[in-house]
Amino acid sequence: MRARHPVFQMPIERGAPVWRYFDFPKFVSLLKERSLYFCRADLLGDPPEGSFTRAREVERERVLASLPTGKAKEEKAVAFGRHANLNAAVLKGTYVNCWHQGDHESMALWRGYGGGPCGVAIRSTVDLLDRLIPEQFDPAPSPTWEANAILIGAVRYVDYASELERVPNDDNAYAPFVCKSVAYEHESEIRALFMDFVRDDVTELPAGRSIPVDLESLILQVIVSPLSPDWFGPLVNDTCQRFGARVTVGHSTVGEAPVY
């Protein structure tokens, strides 16, 4: 059974639909590798990723201001600096796989992540993610590495400019990775993630990790972008067949003819 963690909140409705939007090359990679790609957190493209709100810095400033000038104050400032550097380094050892939770397609995500006219989305459920994504990342074949738990939960959206609002459970290393800026609230994200800190030099860690998964069980439907030309749907279907993926390919409902 997957480990449960107090920082990770799962949706109450286990059958809730989730979506993952791709450009076509990434979709082909999914079929070819039969794996979900977990991106290193510092490469996700969100500047506040893995960080804390302004309230954390305000608290540090308050603590330093309360100390008399001298060795104790200098040591505390150095400790805060080390802690901040460690938190920043955690980005390079955290791997994330992102999904959108929603009952319907999202035009914002089609445009943002769907690759424009050559985009594809896959539909699954929260329960299928929980059951089919492995419980651990096992970096075989190296026997000296330890397996790391893959945790799944809903993202919380916070105001990173706030001097009052804090990242919930911000004393936990996982906490900043289940929060994002309110600017991304439309993404309604569910994410799976794990941390890999076996080696001392985290700068050597790869940009991403591929985690094998049973595609036919995970994918309820493949949806072709409403922005795509007529020839693209058959190409997606042929590509699925070529890679032996027994999945249903459908067209976006966003592109249906209007009723007047």
Image: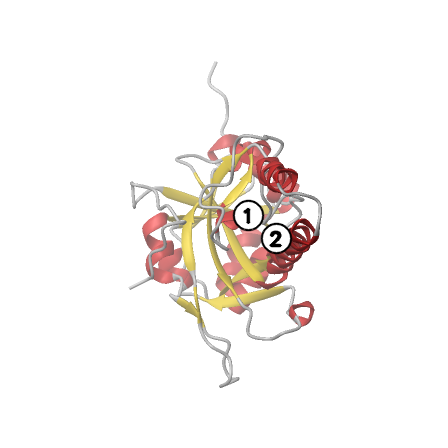
Q: Secondary structure at mark 2?
A: helix
Name the residue nearer the viewer: 109 or 202. Answer: 202
Label 1: how many Cα within 10 Å (few below 14, some 14–19, many 20+): many
**Residue type for callout 1:** Val
Count of numbered tags: 2
Name the residue nearer the viewer: 210 or 82. Answer: 82
Tell me, for residue 71, which label it has, or none.
Answer: none
Q: In terms of image quadrants, where is residue 135?
A: bottom left
Residue 141: x percent and y percent? Answer: 51, 84
Residue 208: x percent and y percent? Answer: 60, 64
Asked whether disc 2 touches disc 1, contact meaning CB atoms under 8 Å apart, the reply is: yes
Tell me: residue 259, above or below residue 144.
Answer: above
Residue 231: x percent and y percent? Answer: 61, 46
Tell me, for residue 24, which label it has, or none.
Answer: 2
Q: Which residue is mark 1?
A: 120
Cα–Cα gap, marks 2 and 1? 6 Å
Q: In terms of image quadrants, where is residue 163?
A: top right
Q: Secondary structure at mark 1?
A: strand
**Residue type for callout 2:** Phe
Q: Residue at x 59, y 63 (%)?
A: 93
- Side of 43 where 249 appears, left or right: left
| Residue 243 seen by the camera | no
- Side of 68 where 147 appears, left or right: left
Q: Identify the coloring.
A: secondary structure
Name the residue nearer the viewer: 44 or 34. Answer: 44
| Residue 212 seen by the camera | yes
Quadrant housing the N terminus:
bottom left
Tell me: residue 63, above or below residue 148.
Answer: above
